[in-house]
Image (cartoon, helix red, strand yellow):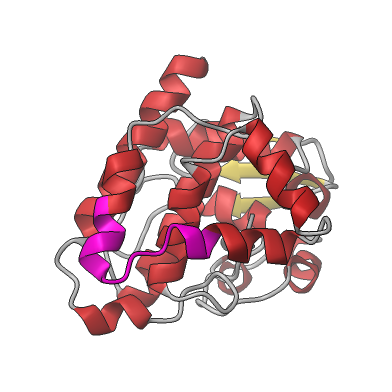
Amino acid sequence: MDKNQIWDAIHAERHRLLDALAPLDDAAWQTPTLCNDWSVAQVLAHLTAAANVGQGAWLLSIVLAGFNPALHNERRLRRHLGATPAESLAILRASAEKTVAPSKDYAAMLGEVIVHGQDIARPLGLELEPEPAGVYEVARFFSERDFAVNSKTLVRGLTLEADDSSFKAGAGTARARQTARSRHGNGRTTRLPRSAAGRRGDGTRTAPALVAPPLHGQPDAASSRHLMPFRKF
């Protein structure tokens, strides 16, 4: 995908998430997500912040935070957190078509929306399936780069291969085959980016170091189901 195609995909995934969240009641917005200790409302505010922070603003923010990524993230999040769910949705909707990013790693921006979208959707039982072309691009990027998450390091020594698309990366002696079919049975590729980014498929939130060991070797069907998405950016 070229730059314009990736931005189109980012905009589409933002709108897809907004549409999925619009029917939720207020209580659902406080549901814990797969993103460490953040609620649905907080993860959405994090995505809104990402849609509004360019390189200069990002650099200033991280310097003022003393190069503490957690403090940087929390400050940006609070600035974009609505007082109500409706306000939070409106803030992101107003930013959904922006083409603002702190770097030219646009695939990472797409990965943030896709994987954080799953961080939200899975605990809520929502059907949120990103477009395969975008997921394919993110899986490729994550397999080639350590960027915000140590995805390349996590999959070192593996061959990554999807069962339902032509995606294949790596030349390791161990193979991690990911059937990318969701529980809804529509077969869209979603698991490989989440695996590389450090989430487990059983919905628990964990550090990537705890996910890496099962990847090394020939995973069985049960262990494959326990590989999945993301840490905070």
Q: Residue furthest left?
A: 23
Q: Position of residue 50 (x, y in %)?
A: 52, 45
* Observer-nearest of 144 and 17: 17
Q: Residue at x 33, y 39 (%)?
A: 96
Q: Main secondary structure of the magenta part?
A: helix
Inspect this view and state whether residue 186 appears.
Answer: no
Answer left or right for 181 relative to 55: left
Answer left or right for 132 relative to 90: right
Answer left or right for 22 relative to 207: left
Q: Residue at x 39, y 76 (%)?
A: 123
Above or below, comparing residue 122 to residue 192 in the picture? below
Q: Residue at x 74, y 59 (%)?
A: 69
Q: Position of residue 157 (x, y in %)?
A: 85, 47
Answer left or right for 61 relative to 222: right
Number of dots carrying numbers: 0
Above or below, comparing residue 9 to residue 173 in the picture? above
* Observer-nearest of 66 and 13: 66
Magenta stretch containing residue 83, yes or no? Answer: yes
Which quadrant holds residue 222?
A: bottom right
Which quadrant holds residue 89?
A: bottom left
Which quadrant holds residue 25?
A: bottom left
Above or below, comparing residue 70 to residue 31 in the picture? above
* Observer-nearest of 184 and 128: 128
Inspect this view and state whether residue 19 appears.
Answer: yes
Q: Position of residue 29 (x, y in %)?
A: 31, 76
Numbered range of the magenta stretch: 77-90
The quadrant in which the C terminus is found is bottom right
Q: Residue at x 43, y 57 (%)?
A: 80
Q: Position of residue 103 (x, y in %)?
A: 66, 30
Above or below, comparing residue 45 to residue 159 in the picture? below
Magenta stretch containing residue 80, yes or no? Answer: yes
